[in-house]
Amino acid sequence: MVERYSREEMKSLWDMNAKYSAWLEVEKAVVKAWNEIGLIPDDDANKIVQNAKFDINRIDEIEAVTRHDLIAFTTSVSEFLGDESRWFHYGMTSSDTVDTAVALQMRDSLKIIIEDVKMLMESVKKRAEEHKYTLMVGRSHGIHGEPITFGLVLAVWYDELKRHLENLEQTMEVISVGQISGAMGNFAHAPIELEEIACKHLGLKPAPASNQVIQRDRYARLATALALLASSIEKFAVQVRHWQRTEVYEAEERFAKGQKGSSAMPHKRNPILTENITGLARIIRAYVTPAMENVALWHERDISHSSTERFWLPDSFITSDFMLHRFNNVISNLVVYPENMMKNLNQTGGLVFSQRVLLELPKKGVSREDAYRFVQRNAMKVWEEIQQGKPTVNENGDSLYLQYLLQDEDLKKSLSEDEIKELFNYDYYTRNVESIFKRVFNDK
């Protein structure tokens, strides 16, 4: 299926026009705040708010000389104003503008990511309900364990996404702060009220304390939240990749009509979307390191953080947005093969019921040690027989493991034939699915 998603919405929040537009929004908010406090006359404030604009090409020209992007910006804006330009950027330092503007960009971008997660949760929930009772084998260490359902696998994913959603919403509170506190953060040239009023206009909270920058532990919190989310999406993607392996083939990415899998082997149907997601997750996690290292700036500030943030902030958001949409496409269109799931579940000739047999014997007075010995020795025979190609089921429909257990004299002393056969019942493993679903999907 061709993905219809375009990254333009997220990308537009991080291009140069968006950057300077955010700067201008902050500067105008401060002008309004100064006006409310009583410093800037109404006429001058109105002229700035109505007429202030910028020219990106002109900013580039000025910056080539000044080697200072904020000064180039304020100079460009001033060229669109008259005498009232003397109030533009009044009492502020560069980071007041830049960091508060980045807070706006992070906030608006995180809103998109949060909506993406909600979208994915709905898709996962829909498929979970669809396959609530679709039996499959559970695996630990990659080895068959016990029967589960495909719906339960997806319920785990949904629950994990709920935690990410909560984390992202909490992170939103952490990053949605601004500062208009001056060169060293001491409000020497502007009253605290200025910051409070300006931030209110912008829909931000004022940072309770700042120096020359908004503290980078807030940014690191964002980086780790996105990295954690990416790691879970990768986890889900790796599961899909395993299910699509030829030897497993329990589910696969939808293979569209006309799609090609290999230039050399026409038969190939590869899990390219989930492999792509695995790679993207590595990139998003890689940005945690510079974000963490940006926390330790010299004294009240340096600009060692600035160069890294020009990369990792937009790239983390754009990549996360893309990855979430891509995986939503995968799960929404995932082709599931219940018959193959059941085939694999039966592949080990009934060994998946070993624990149930083990737990039944102590009820009959058998010690744990003896019960384990009885159950395991028969299980080991089955492993050997399977490797030699012996059928896993006989003409009566009895699994190979059941056949051995019914012949075990020690076992027969404690369990009747009917009692042993009753232990080989898949319904036993699905009896709590409904209760689990209520715990996971009860959104009230």
Image (cartoon, grey):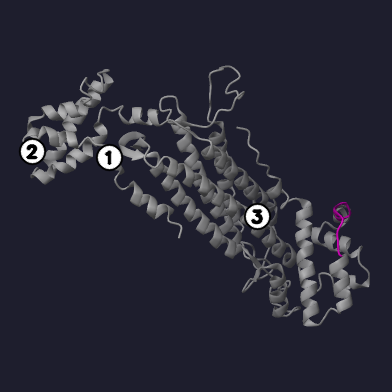
Extent of the magenta region: 52-59
Q: Earlier in the sequence, mark 3 or mark 1?
A: 3
User: If the image is split into quadrants, where does the N terminus sit?
Assistant: top right
Marking on residue 215: none
| Image quadrant where residue 50 sits | bottom right
**Quadrant of the image occupied by residue 309:** bottom right
Outermost bottom residue: 38
Residue 432 vs residue 286: left or right? left
- Residue pointed to by mark 1: 427
Q: Position of residue 347 (x, y in %)?
A: 31, 27
The percent position of residue 359, horizontal first and vertical second, equals 18, 43
Q: Residue at the location (9% across, 35% down)?
A: 416
Residue annotated with mark 3: 109
Q: Are the two marked residues, 2 and 1, in contact with CB atoms closer than 8 angstroms?
A: no
- Distance in Å between CA atoms under marks 3 and 2: 64 Å
How many angstroms separate mark 2 from mark 1 (CA)? 23 Å
Q: Residue 190, position in %: x, y?
A: 75, 78
Q: What residue type is disc 1 on?
A: Asp
Disc 2 target residue: 414
Q: Residue at x 46, y 57 (%)?
A: 443
